[in-house]
Image (cartoon, rainbow, N blue to C red):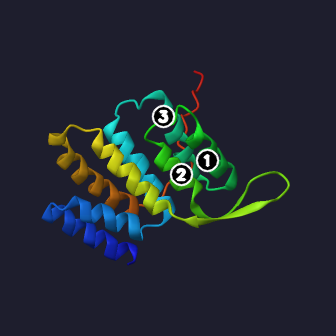
Protein backbone atom coordinates (compact mmCIF):
# COMPACT_ATOMS: atom_id res chain seq x y z
CA UNK A 1 0.00 0.00 0.00
CA UNK A 2 1.53 3.33 -1.00
CA UNK A 3 1.12 6.51 1.05
CA UNK A 4 -1.79 7.78 -1.06
CA UNK A 5 -3.70 4.52 -0.56
CA UNK A 6 -2.86 4.58 3.13
CA UNK A 7 -4.15 8.15 3.42
CA UNK A 8 -7.43 7.15 1.73
CA UNK A 9 -7.74 4.16 4.04
CA UNK A 10 -7.10 6.30 7.14
CA UNK A 11 -9.70 8.82 5.98
CA UNK A 12 -12.23 5.99 5.60
CA UNK A 13 -11.41 4.71 9.10
CA UNK A 14 -11.89 8.17 10.56
CA UNK A 15 -15.26 8.42 8.83
CA UNK A 16 -16.28 4.91 9.96
CA UNK A 17 -14.99 5.58 13.50
CA UNK A 18 -12.82 2.46 13.45
CA UNK A 19 -9.50 3.86 14.65
CA UNK A 20 -7.97 0.52 15.62
CA UNK A 21 -8.04 -0.60 11.98
CA UNK A 22 -6.44 2.68 10.95
CA UNK A 23 -3.72 2.38 13.60
CA UNK A 24 -2.98 -1.18 12.45
CA UNK A 25 -2.74 -0.10 8.80
CA UNK A 26 -0.52 2.87 9.63
CA UNK A 27 1.87 0.67 11.62
CA UNK A 28 1.95 -1.94 8.88
CA UNK A 29 2.43 0.26 5.82
CA UNK A 30 4.09 3.57 6.77
CA UNK A 31 7.88 3.96 6.60
CA UNK A 32 9.84 4.19 9.86
CA UNK A 33 10.53 7.92 9.71
CA UNK A 34 6.84 8.73 9.26
CA UNK A 35 5.87 6.34 12.04
CA UNK A 36 8.27 7.94 14.49
CA UNK A 37 7.13 11.41 13.48
CA UNK A 38 3.50 10.34 13.98
CA UNK A 39 4.45 8.96 17.40
CA UNK A 40 6.01 12.30 18.35
CA UNK A 41 2.97 14.25 17.14
CA UNK A 42 0.64 11.91 19.03
CA UNK A 43 2.62 12.18 22.26
CA UNK A 44 2.76 15.96 22.05
CA UNK A 45 -1.01 16.03 21.53
CA UNK A 46 -1.55 14.05 24.75
CA UNK A 47 1.08 15.80 26.88
CA UNK A 48 0.58 19.36 25.79
CA UNK A 49 1.72 21.88 26.73
CA UNK A 50 4.74 20.12 28.27
CA UNK A 51 5.58 16.40 28.31
CA UNK A 52 6.97 14.91 31.53
CA UNK A 53 10.75 15.59 31.61
CA UNK A 54 11.87 11.98 31.05
CA UNK A 55 9.41 11.61 28.16
CA UNK A 56 10.51 14.94 26.72
CA UNK A 57 14.14 13.76 26.58
CA UNK A 58 13.07 10.63 24.70
CA UNK A 59 10.87 12.61 22.32
CA UNK A 60 13.81 14.90 21.61
CA UNK A 61 15.93 11.94 20.50
CA UNK A 62 13.13 10.53 18.34
CA UNK A 63 12.35 13.89 16.73
CA UNK A 64 16.02 14.58 16.02
CA UNK A 65 16.28 11.18 14.33
CA UNK A 66 13.40 12.17 12.04
CA UNK A 67 15.27 15.37 11.13
CA UNK A 68 18.66 13.71 10.75
CA UNK A 69 18.50 9.91 10.68
CA UNK A 70 21.75 8.28 11.62
CA UNK A 71 23.46 5.66 13.71
CA UNK A 72 24.42 8.09 16.49
CA UNK A 73 20.78 8.83 17.24
CA UNK A 74 19.80 5.17 16.86
CA UNK A 75 22.42 4.29 19.49
CA UNK A 76 21.24 7.16 21.70
CA UNK A 77 17.68 5.85 21.36
CA UNK A 78 18.82 2.35 22.35
CA UNK A 79 20.63 3.67 25.44
CA UNK A 80 17.74 5.89 26.50
CA UNK A 81 15.27 3.01 26.05
CA UNK A 82 17.31 0.93 28.51
CA UNK A 83 17.47 3.72 31.13
CA UNK A 84 15.65 3.29 34.42
CA UNK A 85 13.71 6.46 33.68
CA UNK A 86 12.39 5.21 30.35
CA UNK A 87 8.64 5.72 30.29
CA UNK A 88 6.11 5.26 27.53
CA UNK A 89 8.51 6.70 24.97
CA UNK A 90 10.65 3.59 25.41
CA UNK A 91 8.51 2.07 22.65
CA UNK A 92 9.13 5.02 20.33
CA UNK A 93 12.86 4.91 21.02
CA UNK A 94 12.88 1.23 20.09
CA UNK A 95 11.09 2.13 16.86
CA UNK A 96 14.06 4.40 16.11
CA UNK A 97 16.59 1.76 17.12
CA UNK A 98 14.95 -0.95 15.03
CA UNK A 99 14.20 1.17 11.99
CA UNK A 100 16.16 -1.24 9.82
CA UNK A 101 19.63 -1.55 8.36
CA UNK A 102 23.05 -1.99 9.89
CA UNK A 103 23.72 -0.36 13.24
CA UNK A 104 27.34 0.15 14.28
CA UNK A 105 27.69 -0.79 17.90
CA UNK A 106 31.16 0.63 18.51
CA UNK A 107 33.92 2.72 16.99
CA UNK A 108 35.62 -0.44 15.71
CA UNK A 109 33.09 -0.67 12.91
CA UNK A 110 31.26 -3.73 14.19
CA UNK A 111 27.75 -3.50 12.84
CA UNK A 112 24.69 -5.53 13.69
CA UNK A 113 21.86 -6.00 11.23
CA UNK A 114 18.56 -4.76 12.62
CA UNK A 115 15.21 -5.60 11.09
CA UNK A 116 12.70 -2.85 10.42
CA UNK A 117 10.21 -3.55 13.17
CA UNK A 118 9.48 0.11 13.80
CA UNK A 119 5.80 -0.48 13.02
CA UNK A 120 5.38 -2.97 15.87
CA UNK A 121 7.11 -0.67 18.36
CA UNK A 122 5.14 2.36 17.19
CA UNK A 123 1.92 0.38 17.52
CA UNK A 124 2.86 -0.49 21.10
CA UNK A 125 3.64 3.15 21.79
CA UNK A 126 0.34 4.40 20.36
CA UNK A 127 -1.70 1.83 22.29
CA UNK A 128 0.13 2.68 25.53
CA UNK A 129 -0.52 6.39 24.93
CA UNK A 130 -4.19 5.60 24.51
CA UNK A 131 -4.21 3.47 27.67
CA UNK A 132 -3.11 6.38 29.88
CA UNK A 133 -6.23 8.30 28.89
CA UNK A 134 -9.46 7.89 30.80
CA UNK A 135 -11.77 5.46 28.93
CA UNK A 136 -14.16 8.22 27.90
CA UNK A 137 -11.36 10.17 26.21
CA UNK A 138 -9.75 7.22 24.38
CA UNK A 139 -12.16 7.31 21.46
CA UNK A 140 -11.46 11.00 20.86
CA UNK A 141 -7.72 10.54 21.28
CA UNK A 142 -7.63 7.61 18.85
CA UNK A 143 -9.55 9.62 16.24
CA UNK A 144 -7.09 12.49 16.77
CA UNK A 145 -4.19 10.06 16.34
CA UNK A 146 -5.56 9.04 12.95
CA UNK A 147 -5.79 12.69 11.91
CA UNK A 148 -2.17 13.09 12.97
CA UNK A 149 -1.28 9.93 11.03
CA UNK A 150 -2.73 11.48 7.91
CA UNK A 151 -0.65 14.61 8.50
CA UNK A 152 2.48 12.52 9.03
CA UNK A 153 2.07 10.76 5.69
CA UNK A 154 0.74 13.61 3.53
CA UNK A 155 2.80 16.59 4.63
CA UNK A 156 6.47 17.00 3.81
CA UNK A 157 8.74 15.55 6.45
CA UNK A 158 10.65 18.01 8.59
CA UNK A 159 14.20 18.38 7.34
CA UNK A 160 15.79 20.50 10.05
CA UNK A 161 15.25 21.08 13.71
CA UNK A 162 13.28 24.22 14.42
CA UNK A 163 15.45 27.02 15.65
CA UNK A 164 14.73 30.17 17.54
CA UNK A 165 15.25 33.38 15.58
CA UNK A 166 18.46 35.21 16.42
CA UNK A 167 17.64 38.34 18.42
CA UNK A 168 18.54 41.51 16.59
CA UNK A 169 20.17 44.32 18.53
CA UNK A 170 18.58 47.68 17.97
Quadrant of res 17: bottom left
Nearer the camera: disc 2 or disc 3? 2
Q: Residue at x 49, y 44 (%)?
A: 90
Q: Check disc 1: other Cα within 10 Å, few if <14, some if 14-19, many if 20+.
A: some
State the CA–CA distance, disc 2 to disc 3. 15 Å
Q: Which of marks 1 and 3 precedes in the sequence?
A: 3
Separation (CA) of disc 1 from disc 2: 6 Å
Residue that appears at 44% across and 62% down: 119
Percent position (x, y) of residue 82?
A: 59, 41
Label 1: which residue?
78
Mark positioned earlier in the residue sequence (1 or 2):
1
Specify the quadrant that holds the N terminus. Answer: bottom left
Q: Determine which residue is flagged by label 2.
A: 94
Q: Which mark is residue 56?
A: 3
Q: For this rendering, which residue is in front, 167 or 153? A: 153
Vertical side of 163 occupied by 114: above or below: below
Residue 156 appearing in the image:
no
Whether residue 158 is visible: yes
Quadrant in which the C terminus is drawn: top right
Of residues 170 and 40, which is closer to you in this image? Answer: 40
**Label 3 packing within 10 angstroms: few (<14), some (14-19), many (20+):** some
The reply to whether callout 3 and callout 1 are in contact (CB within 8 Å) is no
In percent of the image, x 74 and y 53: which residue is there?
Answer: 105
**Quadrant location of residue 97?**
bottom right
**Res. 147 mark:** none
Amino acid sequence: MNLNNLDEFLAAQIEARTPSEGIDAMCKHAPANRLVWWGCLSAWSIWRPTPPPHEDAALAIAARWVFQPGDDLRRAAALQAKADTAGLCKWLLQAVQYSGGQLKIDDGGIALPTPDVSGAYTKGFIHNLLAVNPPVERATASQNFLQLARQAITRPMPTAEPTQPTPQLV
